């Protein structure tokens, strides 16, 4: 009996070790709205880049004014805690001295790395960027923010979350998790009076089949959480 107990304990310890080695927190980031202290100048998180070692926020800075806007490389990531925004940056982070120019009625795209930010806890975050609006040669200090939400999903053995906003379009249900490298088939119920485009993380997927009662798409699950979205337009698809 004692030997059996030892064996069971050993098996449980081995399983616990395997799970601890395979399990990870899979950061899934969803962009939200932002704020500005100067009407016409804004910052938004357009997409999330999981492809490199550190996650990046791909942002868009928009200047709908007739004034030039300048900003630097510095930014701050903050987490919302009990009604306050708390700095989530590493204490020793430093930024290069550089000035970027956002032209009147212009748009700039910029990526911000999460290498120096702690987003390990699930919750609401924001990126804060300071800039100057050169109003009649008088710089106006301006603060831009863009919110995003972090859900740290517990995953096992290379599986990642697949989120989708497809309403009632799905012809067959999808699983919530897929293994990196796995082919995912997506079947969309046909609508004959409207056009339909499907996107994976903002990249349009090619329709592979349109026979029968559905349109079929497929993709290889990336090694990070992913999202399916769609757009419709006036048109006829058979």
Image (tube, rainbow, N blue to C red):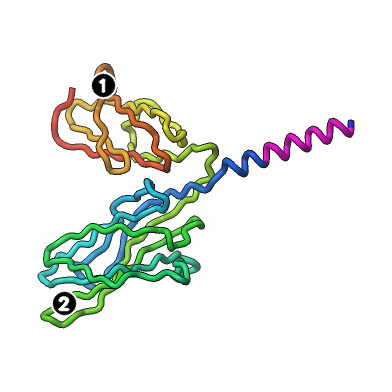
Q: Residue at x 34, y 68 (%)?
A: 75
Mark pair 2, 1: CA separation: 53 Å
**First reached walking from the N terminus: tag 2 or tag 1:** 2
Viewer-nearest residue: 77 or 82 = 77
Classed neighbour count for the residue bearing mark 1: other residues with Cα under 10 Å, few (<14), some (14–19), many (≥20): few
Q: Label 1, on which residue?
A: 209
Is residue 7 one of those drawn in magenta? yes
Q: Residue at x 36, y 41 (%)?
A: 227
Question: In this rendering, would 45 be left or right of 225?
Answer: left
Q: Circle 1 — which element?
A: loop
Q: Residue at x 35, y 49 (%)?
A: 49
Asked where in the image residue 113 lies, by quadrant, the reply is bottom left
Q: Label 2, on which residue?
A: 134
Asked where in the image residue 193 lies, by quadrant, the reply is top left
Above or below residue 83? Residue 164 is above
Q: What residue range appears in magenta?
A: 2-16
Q: Residue furthest top?
A: 212
Residue 95 image position (x, y, % from top left): 35, 70
Residue 229 image position (x, y, % from top left): 30, 40
Secondary structure of the magenta portion, mostly? helix
């Amino acid at each position: 009996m004692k030997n059996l107990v030892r064996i069971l304990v050993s098996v449980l310890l081995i399983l616990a070790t395997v799970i601890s080695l395979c399990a990870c927190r899979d950061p899934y980031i969803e962009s939200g709205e932002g704020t500005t202290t100067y009407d016409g100048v804004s910052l938004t998180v357009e997409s999330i880049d999981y492809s490199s070692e550190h996650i990046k926020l791909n942002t868009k800075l928009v200047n709908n004014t007739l004034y030039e806007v300048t900003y630097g490389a510095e930014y701050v990531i903050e987490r919302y805690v009990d009604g306050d925004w708390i700095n989530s940056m590493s204490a020793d982070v430093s930024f290069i001295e550089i000035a970027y120019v956002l032209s009147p009625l212009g748009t700039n795209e910029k990526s911000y790395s999460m290498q120096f930010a702690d987003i390990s806890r699930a919750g609401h975050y924001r990126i804060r960027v300071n800039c100057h609006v050169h109003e009649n040669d008088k710089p106006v200090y301006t603060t831009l923010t863009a919110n995003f939400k972090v859900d740290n999903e517990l995953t096992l053995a290379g599986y990642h979350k697949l989120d989708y906003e497809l309403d009632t379009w799905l012809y067959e249900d999808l699983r919530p998790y897929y293994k990196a490298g796995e082919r995912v088939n997506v079947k969309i119920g046909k609508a004959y009076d409207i056009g339909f485009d499907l996107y994976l993380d903002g990249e349009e997927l090619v329709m592979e089949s349109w026979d029968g009662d559905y349109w079929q798409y497929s993709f290889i699950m990336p090694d990070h959480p992913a999202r399916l979205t769609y757009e419709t337009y006036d048109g006829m698809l058979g």
